[in-house]
Amino acid sequence: MKAFLNKDKRVKIESYLKFLISSRHNLTAIKDPTEAYQKHFLDIYLPLEGLNLKGNFIDIGTGGGVPGIICAILFPESEWTLLDSIGKKVKEIETFISRLNLKNVRAVCQRAEEHAVLNREKYSGAFMRAVARADICLEYAAPLIHIGGRIYLYRGPGWKEEKDAAEHAASLLGLSIDRVIEYKIEENIKRNLVIYKKVCPTPVEFPRKTGIAVKKPLGGK
Ligand SMILES: C[S@@+](CC[C@H](N)C(=O)[O-])C[C@H]1O[C@@H](n2cnc3c(N)ncnc32)[C@H](O)[C@@H]1O
């Protein structure tokens, strides 16, 4: 199903952005509704407009629920797992999920490396924004998705500099780059949705033990 907006989805997205910017736990530094619409909604929505998504997806390092909650509203026929290692964030997004009456979302408090132990190859796709360097994100996400599944990384203009490290990690993890969607959320704010496809099994040694992906990134220091 392609991403599209109708009145019901618009209302839910506006309510969610209100919850997010008025959170007690400072889930975002953005407090202005117009800026939140641009940086938390348009940033996620614009590159998805032409994409067909259906299945069982995970948002790793969801924080306040971006991109997971936005995606769950845009793609109600898919199942969404929102993962974060910080308990108070997960508790708060659980309240957002129930206030928005979203039936296709669950929130899980766990580190990505630990989630992979019992959920290997469970998902059709993984989304990540602002969690870590791209090569580190790929190590977290690759074991969780099945062959043929995709990893969607929201990256800023620094993507060009981190691309070689990400490509090296991808070659070790069974991934191949699928496409890069370039877009702008404002005339001078350039963004990329970098999409990797899982083409063969991720070796069992990945993800490495908790914390190692950050300490010794696959793409080098
Ligand atoms: C800067 S926030 C980004 C939140 C959100 N994705 C966004 O774009 O607004 C990064 C989040 O990733 C989570 N995180 C970092 N490493 C993680 C890991 N290994 N497993 C689970 N969550 C992780 C942090 O707890 C934090 O909430």
Image: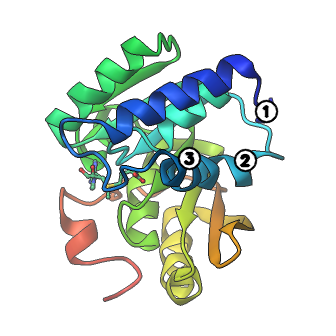
The quarter of the displayed image where residue 189 is located: bottom right
Name the residue that disc number 3 marks.
37
Whether 173 is drawn above or below 36: the answer is below
Callout 2: SS: helix
Which of the two discs, 1 and 2, labels the residue nearer the N terminus?
1
Whether 219 is drawn above or below 175: the answer is below
Name the residue that disc number 2 marks.
48
The residue under the point 37% across, 54% down is 30
Q: Is mark 1 within 8 Å of ligand 1?
A: no
The residue under the point 76% across, 30% down is 5
Which of the two discs, 3 and 1, labels the residue nearer the N terminus?
1
Q: Is mark 3 within 8 Å of ligand 1?
A: no
Instruction: Give the side of residue 4 with respect to residue 111, left or right.
Output: right
Question: Which label was assigned to residue 4?
Answer: 1
Give amino acid for label 2: Leu
Callout 1: SS: loop
Residue 170 at what x, y percent from top left?
54, 70
Q: Nearer the viewer, residue 25 or 121?
A: 25
